[in-house]
Image: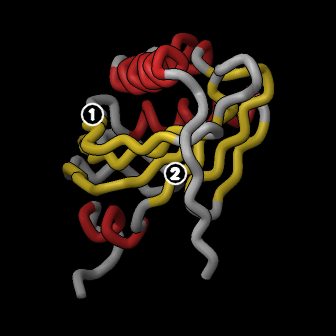
């Protein structure tokens, strides 16, 4: 595997503005404010959540509608940040109560708590071009009781 090390060349004020946008995005998600969440994205957002892809505003809107319905008390705690010229990468913890159907799983009333990694690429105008989010789906499904414990 090839590892490429690069020096960050964008200035600190641009990095700060990008971090502020990610924090606004996360807060809009936690507020379940669909329009405000989508307003942090560029015109053609591209999402990849593990192996599922959501491309364009309507597909991303549908993703968030399902997420917000499934976990109406969702919380995201950003624990680490990594910066590059093209993206900001965060490590975070997601928590919430599964109160309605989500990804086809009927409501369980159970709480989930899991770590995730999210990559936020930016467009040429420093708007969020989407997200790449990675987490262990089996951990969530076990917490929901949809998969047996190992």
Q: Secondary structure at mark 2?
A: strand
- Can residue 57 be seen from the camera position used here? yes
Q: Nearer the viewer, residue 146 or 81?
A: 81
Q: Residues within 10 Å of mark 1 (few under 14, many from 20)?
A: some
Q: Residue at x 36, y 20 (%)?
A: 27
Q: As displayed, is residue 37 above or below residue 100? A: above
Q: Residue at x 65, y 20 (%)?
A: 127
Say which residue label 1 marks: 75
Q: As displayed, is residue 107 above or below residue 70? A: below
Q: Nearer the viewer, residue 62 or 87?
A: 87
Instruction: Decide which of tag 2 and tag 1 comes sooner along the chain.
Output: 1
Residue 59, horizontal then vertical, whole percent:
72, 36
- Can residue 63 be seen from the camera position used here? no
Residue 8, horizontal then vertical, whole percent:
55, 39
Q: Nearer the viewer, residue 110 or 21?
A: 21
Q: CA distance from mark 2 to mark 1?
A: 15 Å
Residue 100, horizontal then vertical, whole percent:
38, 40
Q: Residues within 10 Å of mark 2 (few under 14, many from 20)?
A: some
Say which residue label 2 marks: 133
Q: As displayed, is residue 106 above or below residue 145? A: above
Examine the image and state in which quarter residue 74 appears. Answer: top left
């Amino acid at each position: 595997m090839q590892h490429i090390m690069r020096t960050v060349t964008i200035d600190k004020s641009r990095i700060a503005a990008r971090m502020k946008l990610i924090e606004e995005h996360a807060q809009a998600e936690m507020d379940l404010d669909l329009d405000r969440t989508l307003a942090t994205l560029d015109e053609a957002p591209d999402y990849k959540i593990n192996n599922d892809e959501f491309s364009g505003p309507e597909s991303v809107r549908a993703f968030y509608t399902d997420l917000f319905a499934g976990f109406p008390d969702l919380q995201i705690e950003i624990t680490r940040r990594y910066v590059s010229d093209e993206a900001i990468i965060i490590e975070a913890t997601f928590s919430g109560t599964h109160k309605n159907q989500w990804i086809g799983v009927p409501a369980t009333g159970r709480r989930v708590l899991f770590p995730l990694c999210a990559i936020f690429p930016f467009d040429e105008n420093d708007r969020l071009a989407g997200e790449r989010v990675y987490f262990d789906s089996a951990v969530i499904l076990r917490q929901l009781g949809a998969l047996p414990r190992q």
